[in-house]
Image: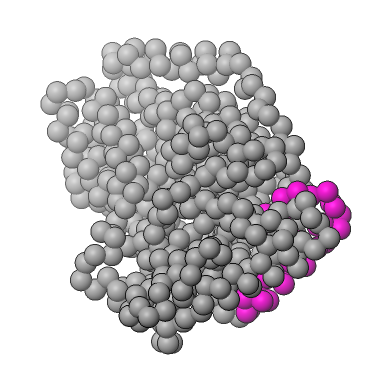
């Protein structure tokens, strides 16, 4: 096996091992140094393909809990970014000295994949693991992406030192600036303390329970029991929060009309009057919060729009993934729609407008319980809570990885955030650590407290410094008052 391939493969291995939940964030530096050294020694596109497949298969290894081949499929989609990096580094090599051609190539590739494919795949970024490091405070200035770029400069600096390149001097300036920032950055200004009392409910439902073994009433009962226990201990709770999609019935707007119509694999199309679902919604919430007139329920739901009763059977209800706020009497107060949809889980390439898309969607539905035909509603957070904070930013699962989702809501006045997620799909492992690390970056970047409420973990409160001030154990049911 040639030396360049070994360098690239070992670098890919170390980069995967640097992700949260693996062996330590600092491994990203030698990983990037080996990547740069591989180009210096003449690695080619075949080395890039091999390294890209290895890194992304490991980075997405948690997808193996859904299907053993899913990490390979994800790696095949993402590996071309490594090929692009190599192509760009080699093209620039005749104009830009090593390692700067490689640094520029990696930085460009990392930037591009925040947009492509299918709205961007910003997971496993260069700075993600550094949420557990001394770099976290400067995230308030540079953000996760900027810290990742700084780490890339560090790797390039070490490569220059090893080869005694004069170019190392050029990299000293940003590194010294980073040291100054780490040493002298002021403490973040205290954000407005959350005066609203929240009860986070972590039901710890397995996929089998959520998608078949338990009825909708059973799923609701599991949450209701935990909620009742929590309210008994914390009777002044103002906001009860359940995780993503933990509202077990189709959620609807009471002002809507017609039918909720949705398909099922191997079963007849389901049709339920919107008015009937609205009555269920109101009755269940009011029963849940009986005796607590000041409490409200914030819950993740699949939200459906009505279709006319006389419409063709093939016309299905538009469906969105939303955060829904209910009053104690069951009335719908406000709602926020998920904008960043999970590729192949909630959406298909090209909006599903390609031959075989319907068949592919139903196969995904049969395998995972999710039909990838979700829409992006025209509205998003922050939610108007009627309490302090008056405006509560929201994010659902995958959106946790997108800084722009949070920045946009801060501009619109969000004073704090709630992230709702259901990560039972991925087991109890590294994926949870990576999602929590991403939340830490979002808290530091926005200067806002963030409450994570998940089905299986990790549920916790992250303060404006990125510190996890309280959390529930992963893989266990429980409630947490904040």
Is 239 magenta? The answer is yes
Residue 118 visible somewhere in the drawing: yes
Which residue is nearer to you in this view: 213 or 102?
A: 213
Residue 473 in sight here: no
Q: Main secondary structure of the magenta part?
A: helix
Left or right of residue 23, residue 113 in this image: left
In this view of the protein, which residue sits in the foreground, 227 or 112? 227
Q: Residue at x 52, y 72 (%)?
A: 274
Whole-percent x and y of residue 464? 63, 31
Q: Which residue is rendered at x = 57% and y = 45% of the image?
A: 383
Query: How many numbered circles does the render carry?
Result: 0
Q: Is residue 377 left or right of residue 414?
A: left
The one nearer the camera, 102 or 113, is: 113
Magenta segment: 214-242
Q: Residue at x 37, y 35 (%)?
A: 32
Up-down: is 451 above or below 322? above
Indicate the colouring scheme: one colour
**Which image quadrant: the C terminus?**
top right
- Residue 392 magenta: no
Q: Position of residue 107 (x, y in %)?
A: 32, 33
Instruction: Check the image and report above or below for 145 versus 327.
Output: above
State left or right for residue 102 relative to residue 220. left
User: Residue at the spot x=51%, y=28% of the render?
Assistant: 139
Q: Position of residue 455 (x, y in %)?
A: 63, 60
The correct choice, above or below, for 348 with respect to 163 in the image is below
* Left or right: residue 34 compared with residue 201: left
Q: Position of residue 250 (x, y in %)?
A: 54, 70
């Amino acid at each position: 096996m040639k030396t360049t391939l070994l360098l690239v493969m070992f670098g890919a291995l170390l980069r995967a091992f640097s992700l949260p939940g693996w062996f330590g964030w600092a491994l990203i530096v030698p990983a990037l140094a080996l990547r740069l050294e591989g180009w210096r020694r003449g690695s080619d596109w075949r080395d890039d393909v091999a390294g890209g497949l290895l890194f992304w298969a490991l980075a997405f290894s948690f997808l193996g809990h859904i299907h053993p081949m899913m990490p390979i499929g994800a790696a095949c989609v993402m590996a071309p970014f490594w090929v692009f990096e190599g192509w760009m580094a080699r093209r620039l090599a005749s104009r830009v000295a090593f390692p700067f051609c490689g640094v520029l190539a990696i930085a460009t590739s990392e930037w591009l994949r925040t947009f492509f494919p299918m709205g961007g795949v910003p997971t496993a970024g260069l700075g993600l693991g550094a949420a557990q490091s001394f770099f976290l405070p400067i995230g308030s200035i540079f953000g996760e992406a900027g810290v990742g770029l700084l780490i890339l400069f560090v790797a390039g600096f070490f490569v220059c030192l090893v080869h005694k390149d004069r170019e190392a001097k050029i990299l000293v300036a940003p590194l010294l600036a980073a040291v100054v920032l780490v040493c002298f950055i002021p403490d973040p200004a205290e954000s407005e303390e959350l005066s609203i009392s929240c009860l986070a409910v972590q039901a710890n439902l397995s996929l089998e329970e959520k998608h078949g073994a338990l009825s909708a009433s059973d799923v609701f009962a599991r949450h209701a029991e935990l909620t009742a226990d929590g309210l008994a201990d914390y009777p002044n709770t103002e906001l009860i929060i359940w995780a993503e999609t933990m509202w077990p019935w189709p959620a609807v707007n009471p002002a809507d009309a017609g039918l909720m119509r949705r398909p099922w694999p191997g079963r007849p199309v389901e049709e339920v009057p919107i008015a009937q679902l609205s009555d269920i919604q109101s009755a269940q919430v009011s029963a849940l919060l009986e005796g607590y007139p000041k409490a409200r329920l914030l819950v993740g739901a699949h939200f459906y729009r009505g279709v006319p009763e006389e419409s063709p059977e093939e016309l299905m209800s538009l469906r969105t993934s939303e955060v829904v706020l209910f009053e104690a009497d069951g009335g719908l107060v406000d709602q926020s729609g998920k904008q960043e949809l999970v590729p192949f889980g909630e959406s298909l390439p090209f909006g599903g407008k390609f031959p075989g898309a319907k068949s592919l969607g139903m196969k995904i539905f049969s395998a995972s319980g999710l039909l990838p035909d979700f829409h992006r509603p025209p509205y998003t957070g922050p939610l108007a809570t009627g309490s302090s904070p008056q405006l509560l930013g929201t994010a659902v699962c995958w959106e946790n990885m997108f800084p722009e989702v949070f920045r946009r809501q801060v501009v619109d006045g969000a004073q704090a955030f709630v992230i709702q997620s259901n990560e039972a799909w991925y087991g109890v492992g590294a994926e949870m650590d990576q999602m929590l690390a991403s939340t830490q970056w979002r808290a530091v970047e926005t200067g806002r407290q963030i409450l994570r409420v998940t089905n299986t973990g990790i549920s916790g409160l992250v303060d404006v410094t990125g510190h996890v001030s309280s959390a529930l154990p992963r893989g266990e049911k429980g409630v947490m008052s904040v």
